[in-house]
Amino acid sequence: MIRRQGHVPTPEASRYLQRLCFHFTKKIAVTYDEHRGDAAFPWGRCVMHADAEALHFDCTAADAESLGRVQFAIDAHVSLFSRKRPMAVVWREPEA
């Protein structure tokens, strides 16, 4: 498995987490509450958590192409749900 982490600075992290997860439930298996979400995409998995300063993403997949698809899904939906105040995920390699 390979992994990529990202975050979106926002004081409304919990609201965005819940909106993303609710939207994803229409097509994939998702569990979530106000502070944590777990989305099982066909290509990989994304665990999300919200704190007072940001929405965090921890994505895993079997290979780089699949991980790219998970990241694309997250990026596209963050962009979609933040149209009024555009936000983008800042991705980085996971810490050791």
Image: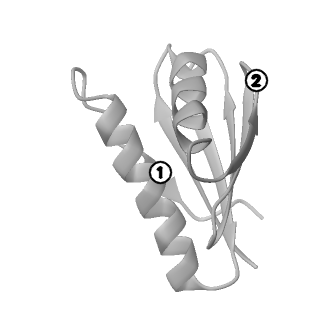
Secondary structure state at the residue bearing disc 2: loop
User: Which residue is drawn at the image coordinates 31% and 40% (left, top)?
Assistant: 79
Residue picked out by circle 1: 74
Q: Is residue 4 left or right of residue 73?
A: right
User: Which residue is drawn at the image coordinates 48% and 61% (left, top)?
Assistant: 71
Pointer 2 local density, CA inside 10 Å: few below 14, some 14–19, many at least 20: few
Which of disc 2 and disc 1 is earlier in sequence?
A: 2
User: Quadrant where the C terminus lies?
Assistant: bottom right
Q: Is residue 78 left or right of residue 1?
A: left
Amino acid type shown at disc 1: Ile
User: Which residue is drawn at the image coordinates 57% and 51% (left, top)?
Assistant: 27
Q: In this view, does 67 lie to the left or right of 47?
A: left
User: Which residue is drawn at the image coordinates 47% and 51% (left, top)?
Assistant: 74
Residue 44's image quarter? bottom right
The vertical placement of 10 against 43, above or below, is above
Residue picked out by circle 2: 33
Amino acid type shown at disc 2: Asp
Residue 62 picture location, percent across and down: 70, 82
Residue 5 picture location, percent across and down: 61, 55
Pointer 1 local density, CA inside 10 Å: few below 14, some 14–19, many at least 20: some
Residue 16 picture location, percent across and down: 51, 25
The vertical placement of 33 against 52, above or below, is below
User: Quadrant where the N terminus lies?
Assistant: bottom right
